[in-house]
């Protein structure tokens, strides 16, 4: 009887031991379950972070250029699309490029269509830079980042992007620098632009669009640079040419008829107008570098070739390669959810007979 009791007690003790082990094992497995849960949460967070970006090949891009007929912006948009497709991996069918036709209402309608079609990012060359606040708010409401190019919104607007955390940015070149380079090119001539030796440089200024900040700065800083070089200046004419070659020709022709040999320098806010001015100068039998000087901005192929041939005093290379590629890179940053600076600048390059052939090789 005692033996049977001892066996029963032994069995009971074994059962208790086994149960205790089972409880211990169950308890020790909890951290493993928590670790698994933590790992899964980390993977989910990583997936969410990836989802914040947009696959480049699937990204839809809306691009509006203020006017397709603008020579410089034709070079710009061609390089922009080429770089996006060939080097960044965008799908060309997903890139829509629209002609703003120099009509802000038309362009605003295009932007509305971009929003309706669900583009992932916009690249905009505004018809009127003053429309930036309205356009920015449209894009913000639709949660679409925007890269402004070539025509810079005013400082108050770009400051707002930073203070309000708006996904908007601008890339371009400092128009003050381009104007300064124009003035320096005249100041660096043998007589500093004073062809008749009367102590004053008499000039006409053919302006792009007076509302455009680039036109304003090029107009102001070209003359400032010449005066900073110690020259007195006299403005014979300041007239709007709307960046247009035919208007540049007509304005110069009329000015040559009115002022004749008194005109020593023709300043043009861009090369298209300067090429028009050259036609009028040649028709009037005036000779660049001898009895008149001519400068523009953009470094269009024809303008640079004319510098090589001695038919143009100088121009300023508006680096559309750097700007177009930079605009595309900024768009990619937005698509990847990265932070972007409000203002991004690309340097101009002075183009003179000393480096014209080198620049021509680059832009051909």
Image: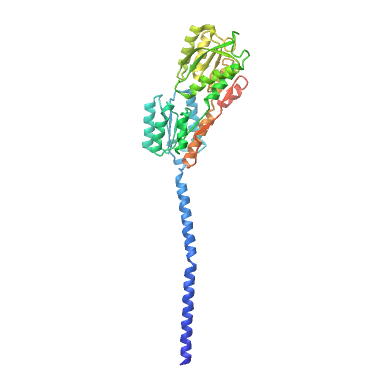
Residue ID at (46%, 30%): 156
Question: Where is residue 280 drawn, in percent x and y?
Answer: 50, 11
Question: Where is residue 61 drawn, in percent x and y?
Answer: 43, 36
Is residue 212 shown to the viewer in this render?
yes
- 9 vs 79: above or below: below
Please, which colouring scheme is shown?
Answer: rainbow
Q: Quadrant of the N terminus?
A: bottom left
Question: Where is residue 207 drawn, in percent x and y?
Answer: 48, 18
Residue ID at (48%, 81%): 13
Nearest the eye: 119 or 139: 139
Residue 350's quadrant in the figure? top right
Q: Quadrant of the C terminus?
A: top right
Is residue 85 shown to the viewer in this render?
no
- Answer left or right for 234 relative to 139: right
Question: Where is residue 167 drawn, in percent x and y?
Answer: 45, 38
Residue ID at (48%, 24%): 213
- 318 vs 295: above or below: below
Nearest the eye: 256 or 59: 256
Give the residue at the far bottom of this rendering.
1
């Amino acid at each position: 009887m005692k033996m049977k009791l001892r066996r029963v007690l032994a069995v009971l003790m074994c059962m208790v031991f086994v149960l205790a082990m089972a409880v211990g094992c169950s308890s020790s497995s909890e951290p493993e379950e928590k670790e698994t849960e933590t790992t899964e949460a980390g993977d989910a967070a990583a997936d969410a972070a990836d989802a914040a970006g947009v696959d480049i090949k699937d990204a839809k891009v809306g691009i509006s250029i203020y006017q397709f007929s603008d020579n410089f912006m034709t070079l710009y948009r061609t390089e922009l699309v080429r770089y996006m497709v060939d080097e960044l991996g965008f799908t060309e069918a997903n890139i829509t490029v629209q002609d703003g036709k120099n009509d802000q209402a038309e362009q605003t309608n295009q932007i509305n269509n971009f929003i309706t079609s669900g583009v992932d990012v916009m690249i905009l060359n505004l018809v009127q830079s003053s429309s930036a606040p309205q356009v920015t708010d449209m894009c913000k409401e639709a949660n679409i980042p925007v890269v402004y190019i070539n025509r810079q919104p005013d400082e108050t607007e770009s400051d707002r992007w930073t203070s309000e955390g708006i996904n908007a940015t601008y890339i371009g070149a400092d128009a003050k620098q381009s104007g300064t380079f124009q003035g320096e090119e005249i100041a660096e001539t043998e007589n500093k632009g004073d062809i008749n030796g009367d102590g004053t440089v008499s000039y006409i200024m053919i302006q792009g669009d007076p509302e455009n900040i680039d036109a304003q700065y090029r107009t102001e800083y070209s003359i400032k640079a010449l005066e900073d070089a110690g020259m007195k200046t006299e403005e014979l004419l300041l007239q709007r040419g709307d960046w247009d070659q035919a208007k540049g020709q007509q304005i110069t022709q009329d000015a040559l008829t009115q002022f004749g040999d008194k005109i020593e320098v023709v300043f043009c806010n861009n090369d298209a107008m300067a090429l028009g001015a050259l036609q009028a100068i040649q028709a009037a039998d005036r000779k660049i570098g001898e009895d008149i000087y001519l400068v523009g901005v953009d470094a269009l192929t024809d303008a640079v070739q004319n510098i090589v041939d001695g038919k143009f005093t100088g121009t300023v290379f508006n680096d559309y390669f750097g700007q177009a590629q930079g605009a595309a890179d900024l768009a990619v940053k937005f698509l990847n959810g990265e932070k972007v600076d409000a203002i991004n600048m690309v340097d101009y390059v002075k183009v003179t007979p000393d480096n014209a052939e080198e620049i021509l090789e680059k832009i051909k």
